[in-house]
Image (tube, grey):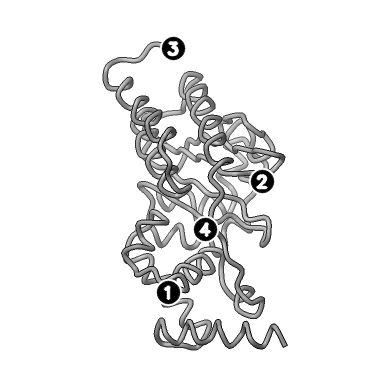
Amino acid sequence: MHFDRVQGALFGDIAEALQAQLPSGELRDRVGTALMDLLGAEYFASYVWDYAVGAYDSGVSKGMDPANLLRYEQYYQFHDPLTPAMARYHQHAKDVHEVLPRTELINTEFYNDFLAVDGLYYGLNFFGYAGGKQVGDLRIWRTKSRGPFGRTERALLEIIGKSLCTQLSVRPEVTAELPSVIGTVLTPRERQITVAVLRGLDDAEISEQFGISYATVRTHLSHVFGKLHVSSRMGLIAAVRKAENQQIR
């Protein structure tokens, strides 16, 4: 596979990130940034499947509207005819229109009310597995005007995706359980941020850890506060501790 100077530098950036000891979110963010340029894409997103709650979590993205992604996390991933079918192709990069024909996709709610909002039309997805479990994915998209991805782009995504999968499988994320009465009312991302607050992270640190904007962190926290009927971090911590004590009894 021949690279010009720019492509070689981008591939080198990806290789360097894959060798670094980075948390999952930061690793996927760095790989995704270079991958967009390498494959000529305008959009990137990556998630990890949370087996405990049956939802995609720990999302990082580039080029997409944070509000639209929030709608994905809260609603559209549960009304998605494409991603479950794509995820069956373990360790293989697939063109989305190979899995769900374009004529069918453009007639779905998922396309018209989610993908089309940001202009996502041509897509390549890779779903990485280790030990029989999904450890991360890479979702690359282009607008209609850019044209479809070719065999070279698909081969590159598969090579990089497999390397990423290997790295993610040896970098387990630190997790913590929330009391069920708390966890069941929050989205996967809201649970993640709640745990970060309990660990003492401020908004800027949460933004950096999960690869999302400061404003998006504030939006998630606002939703958490509303659902738990609190108005501050101290109130949030108190509500969780109270729920923990009630769960123990």
Where in the figure is residue 56, as x and y percent of width and height?
A: 58, 54
172 and 38: which is toward the camera: 172
Mark 3: secondary structure: loop
Which mark, by number, is residue 84? 2
Q: Residue at x 36, y 71 (%)?
A: 218
Number of residues whose C-alpha sits closer than 10 Å to that of mark 3, classed few (under 14), some (14–19) or many (20 or more): few
Identify which residue, 82 or 220, lies in the foreground: 220
**Residue type at mark 2?**
Pro
For residue 1, which numbered disc appears in the image? 3
Which element carries disc 2, helix, strand or loop? helix
Q: Amino acid at mark 3?
A: Met
Q: Nearer the viewer, residue 153 or 150?
A: 153
* Comes first in the chain, label 1 or label 4: 4
Q: Residue at the location (52% across, 25% down)?
A: 159
Nearer to us of marks 2 and 3 is 3
Query: Which quarter of the image is occupied by the C terminus?
Result: bottom right
Q: CA distance from mark 1 to mark 4?
A: 17 Å
Q: Residues within 10 Å of mark 1 (few under 14, many from 20)?
A: many
State the image quarter where residue 92 is shown. Answer: top right
Instruction: Kindly identify the amino acid type of the residue bearing the numbered disc 1.
Output: Leu
Where disc 1 sits, the SS reads: helix
The residue pinned by badge 1 equals: 221
Image-quadrant location for residue 221: bottom left
Is 38 drawn above or below residue 176 in the view shown? above
Q: Residues within 10 Å of mark 4 (few under 14, many from 20)?
A: some
Query: Which residue is rendered at x = 48% and y = 35% of the image?
Result: 122
| Amino acid residing under circle 4 | Tyr
Tag 4 residue: 72
